[in-house]
Amino acid sequence: MPLSLQQVEHIAELAKLALTDEEKERYRLQLSAILEYADMLQRLDLDGVPPMSHAVALTNITRPDEPAASSPRDEILANTPDHKDGLIRVRPILE
Amino acid sequence: MSAHALTIHEAGELLRAGDLSSAELTRAILERIHRLDPRVRAYLRVVPEAALAQAEQADAHLARWRREGGALPPRLLGIPLAIKDILCTRGIPTTCGSRILENFVPPYDATAVERLKAQGAVVLGKTNTDEFAMGSSTENSAYFTTRNPWDLSRVPGGSSGGSAAAVAADMALGALGSDTGGSVRQPAGLCGVVGLKPTYGRVSRWGLVAFASSLDQIGPIAKDVRDCAILLQAIAGHDPRDSTSVDAPVPDYLAALEGGIRGLRVGVPREYFVEGVQAGVADAVRAALRVLEGLGATLVEVSLPHTEYALPAYYLIAPAEASANLARYDGVKYGLSVRESADVWDMIRRTRGQGFGPEVKRRIMLGTYALSAGYYDAYYLRAQKTRTLIRQDFDRAFQQVDVLACPVSPTVAFPIGERAEDPLQMYLSDVFTLACSLAGVCGISVPCGFADGLPVGLQIIGNVFDEPTVLRVAYAYEQATDWHTRKPKLDEEV
Amino acid sequence: MEYEAIIGMEVHAQLLTRSKMFCACAADYAAAPPNTRVCPVCLGMPGTLPVINRRAVEFVVMTGLALHCRIADHSRFARKNYHYPDLPKGYQISQYELPLCSDGYLEIEVDGRVKRIGIERVHLEEDTAKLIHTGDYSLIDANRAGVPLMEIVSAPDLRTGEEARQYLTRLRTILRYLGVSSGNMEEGSMRCEVNISLRPAGTDVRGTKVEVKNLNSFRSVKQAIEYETERQRRLLESGERVVQVTMGWDEAHGRTVLQRVKESADDYRYFPEPDLPPLELSRQWVEEIRARLPELPEARRERFVRDYGLSAYDAGVLTADRDVADFFEAVVGLGGDAKGAANWITGEIFRLMNARGLEMGQMPIRPAQLCELMGLIQEGVITTTIAKDVLGHMVDTGESPGDIVRQRGLAQVRDTAALEGVARQVIADNPDAVAQYLAGKEQVLKFLVGQMMKATRGQANPTLAAEILKALLAGHRS
């Protein structure tokens, strides 16, 4: 079933993407086509098949709890668009 | 032979013998980049001063070694290489082909880059890529499209199209790319060079900007199989900074090249020889199979029955992971930030809306949808289960055969713009590389001929951590043919 | 109609590891200038990857064991996807399916009876950066980003604010005993959210859940629950509907205020974290962790009653804080009298701690010093009254009680000749009292002893002083 405009807008909001009306319509059609194609997975009998979330069977990969030096603050903030007195600044956060 | 046309192993011999200096070699390559890259457009950024400084250091090392003897210098000492711009390079902007990271300068090197540098390799610059490695043609780069050195009106493949084109055009002796669903093998195939996707976990992903974390692997792109082995040898191995990198001994990949393939069983998966494969491509690959047979290998027809499900599974899993991996680009900590915004949410939405290109946004949308409430089970979870079946296909096949051989791509390089408007058509160009990525096994693309004057790649897929066998088959094939010695005629067009 | 409140709690506790959850930055950021405990990993820079801090996993398992949880054989991390400027990666590495611990309980006491509060899950995640809101900007300090955070989710088994307060208190005691968290709510190292719904008493109707946040102390948890219960009860009684919202506790005005209306359920799009292989908690690993568990408060309280003959109340007070209980046992171990030590600790030492706003661990007084102080009283060197002053000096200076007594000349005066002089003076200065005593009002002696104590600034041995006075007054009588 093709996606609705409302669904596209909902996804865009979850993904925090500002889209133009033209983009919304294009993605609505393109995503619908891709999902329709992906529907071929519904044909498969997947009962009892475990999902594969990792390509390599490792477990318990951990590190010891040993602190090391953090980065110099200048280095950390070198790429930051807006910062002052060592703090990253953004426009006020309104819910 | 001109210095730029050398392979890594050839150049290495000359460097050690003192018949060539790294500075000369690097200058020759930089000169060639200066002359040809305005047409090929493989590089997003070249760093000539830094490269020459590294070359001079290498020369000093080589001179000391020739004077004083001691341990053999590393194979990559003084060798000029190109790095896909999705691998972090300390102090050199790393854009991932995206506007959103246009001015991002990482304070760290990717482990793979660090390991090349540790050998004394010379970093020439950063090569073009589809934005965040999402694409099969470099047309999704936010900056420009790289041209195929064999036909400048055609794509080089992607997403590591810049690295493949640079190597094919002798604008680097070798390069690193990254492969999530075919992004090393497909452009290598389309540009007529060698490209290897290692087994997932073989090469550290630290510093590789994530597209789809459970699929991404860094791989070498080279002029021949021996060079490919040299590069893999340098970058493979455990890294405690990547929890998915495997702590297993790294075999001697150069030693593995020798010995031939007599008695080896080569699987021919029937699902890869179907309608939709360009006739010239199918012919070249079948001819290659006969060469392998002639070298003493046994061809065995096998089946990977879930092959057709690889594409839909991949295009749910990879975008889902990408939707999370790309959430960090929000204009707060680094990268593009759209300033004239009312509040922080407006800034984040607009930064992401303007900073990402159409394909990236499309995949973020797709991935977000596949993970969202009510659709997770139907899409993401089903895709992950399908992935298990695809892996089992390979497990079964590798009980019967040592390697699999098949085309890399169903067609040769396609004209720029041909598939840009139809994402599904574009996705289909990866149809033969996706299953290998989903299974996490290793695969190589080696040149195996031409169709319509454009290179065709033979894909050899091996079991997990069986890069030695894959390299041996590829090397045996290469030694029996001369496709890898063919060069595009770029100079004549000037 | 009568309503009952159905209350569940989500507690987040920062873990006392040395390094952060997924990188090696120091986890103790309290005194660090902004953004100086930050590296590319915890700032979520492109290409960086997380690596699990093993001790953080073990701390959560320890907590799970202390809370009688089932420890998962297989556990894994998941990405919780949402955008917020304090969340560097745009997702939080957390746990969703397969948390480390589940299905446990914590016991509290209600009306003298033990009540079990279910623990649904205990899982591990990473903290967010700290936001500072000024007028024109929000400021971000990423020092806190990536600090290990343990989430403990109770079953909706709590019914009152007092139960919730007790649950939290006991939970904190356990976390401190384990040494896994400081549990400091005021400083935000322990945070709590409460879910409250009301239903007609005795039914199993599902009421609309209201979430209450911004609870910064045990007291505010109790008050907020009581306020919110009452608010919902009034709504229901007046025939109105409770709306599913998030409320914030307004400490200054003692009320809950609307923070956010939940239009639709949050969609966090959890999926298994591909950067982190799963955890397999073998029996052997879990047993190794279990072997490291200290004695927990309940068991210790029972043992204090049994072994030291303390009242259940005193034992409870002493074991509510691991440092206090350790201090007590150290004093006893050095030969100090158990009941005496308990009295000193729960009386004078607690008073000094409160007055100075110190925790036991911060008090500059060692168990051996309390032991010595108690010995000085027993030997008659100082009186209990003097001892209280000495203790004050001990806390102020960290000096030993013997030194303080010597330097300040606080030892009791046992010199009969000296005391006789004082007694003569007191008799001379108080003719009325002496007359009354001689007239048969013997209780006046106490007053005269008091005058001697005053004259000697408390250093007179009161028994000796009384004897001397009696003897001298007997002379007056004759």
Image (tube, rainbow, N blue to C red):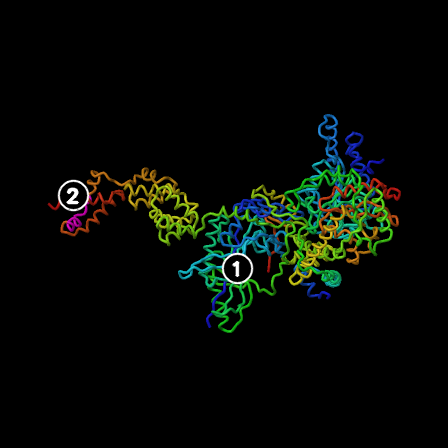
Q: Looking at the picture, do discs 2 and 1 lie on one chain?
A: yes
Q: Tell me residue C36's x, y (percent).
A: 58, 45
How many marks on residues?
2
On the question of residue C412 being in view, the answer is: yes
Q: Does the magenta stretch include residue C430?
A: yes
Q: Tell me residue C235's x, y (percent).
A: 50, 70
Q: Could you tell me what secondary structure mostly forms the magenta stretch?
A: helix
Dot 1 amino acid type: Lys
Q: Mark 1 points at which residue?
A: C213
Q: Tell me residue B329's x, y (percent).
A: 67, 52
From which residue to which does the magenta span run? C424-437
Task: Give the crowd class for mark 2: few <14, some 14-19, many >=20 residues within 10 Å.
Answer: some
Quadrant of the frame with the C terminus of chain B: top right
Q: Mark 2 points at which residue?
A: C472
**In this view, which residue lies farthest toward the top?**
B68
The residue positioned 14% from the left and 49% from the top of the image is C438
Q: Does the magenta stretch include residue B125?
A: no
Q: Taking C242 as reference, is C143 above or below it?
A: above
**In this view, which residue lies farthest toward the left?**
C478
The residue positioned 50% from the left and 59% from the top of the image is C118
- Pointer 1 indicates a residue of which chain? C
Dot 2 amino acid type: Leu
Quadrant of the frame with the N terminus of chain B: top right
Task: Work out whether mark 2 precedes mark 1 in sequence or the reverse, and give the earlier one.
Answer: 1
On the question of residue A27 being in view, the answer is: no
- Pointer 2 indicates a residue of which chain? C
Q: Tell me residue B431's x, y (percent).
A: 78, 54
Secondary structure at numbered mark 2: helix
* Residue closest to the eye, B110 or A26: B110
Q: Distance between the residues labelled 2 and 1?
A: 72 Å
Secondary structure at numbered mark 1: strand
